[in-house]
Amino acid sequence: MRRLLDAGVRVYAEEPGLAAHGLDGEGRLLDRVRPPPADEAATRWSTYRMVCFL
């Protein structure tokens, strides 16, 4: 993950997935990893060159 971030790749983590793994509250994500609004994630995919799931 840090290599991706260091390479300038934008990394998003969806809230439902975070909650399902008990990751809520402060300190749950690495710096520069952002949770997008729940209803916005898939709507942006057409503007990206590539979408990968990790």
Image (cartoon, rainbow, N blue to C red):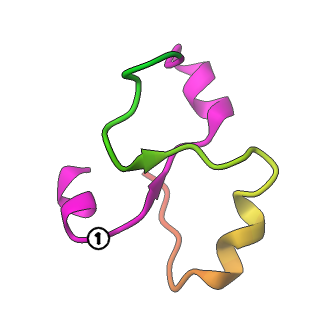
Determine if the magenta segment contains residue 15: yes
Q: Is residue 14 left or right of residue 53?
A: right
Residue on which the image places disc 1: 8
Kindly identify the residue that appears in the image at 73 percent across and 62 percent down: 42
Q: Is residue 45 left or right of residue 35?
A: right
- Across and down, in percent, residue 37 comes to 72, 47
18 in relation to 34, above or below: above
- Across and down, in percent, residue 31 comes to 31, 42
Determine if the magenta segment contains residue 18: yes
Kindly identify the residue that appears in the image at 57 percent across and 43 percent down: 35
Q: Exactly how many numbered labels are in the figure?
A: 1
- Across and down, in percent, residue 36 comes to 63, 49
47 in relation to 20, above or below: below
Q: Is residue 16 left or right of residue 2?
A: right
- Where disc 1 sits, the SS reads loop
Kindly identify the residue that appears in the image at 44 percent across and 19 percent down: 26
Residue range of the region highlighted in magenta in the rendering: 1-24
Kindly identify the residue that appears in the image at 36 percent across and 50 percent down: 32
In the image, farthest residue toward the right: 39
Q: Quadrant of residue 6?
A: bottom left
18 in relation to 22, above or below: below
Q: Name which residue type carries label 1.
A: Gly
- Across and down, in percent, residue 33 comes to 41, 47
Q: Is residue 9 left or right of residue 35?
A: left
Q: How crowded is the residue under tag 1: few (<14 C-alpha within 10 Å), some, or many (20+)?
A: few
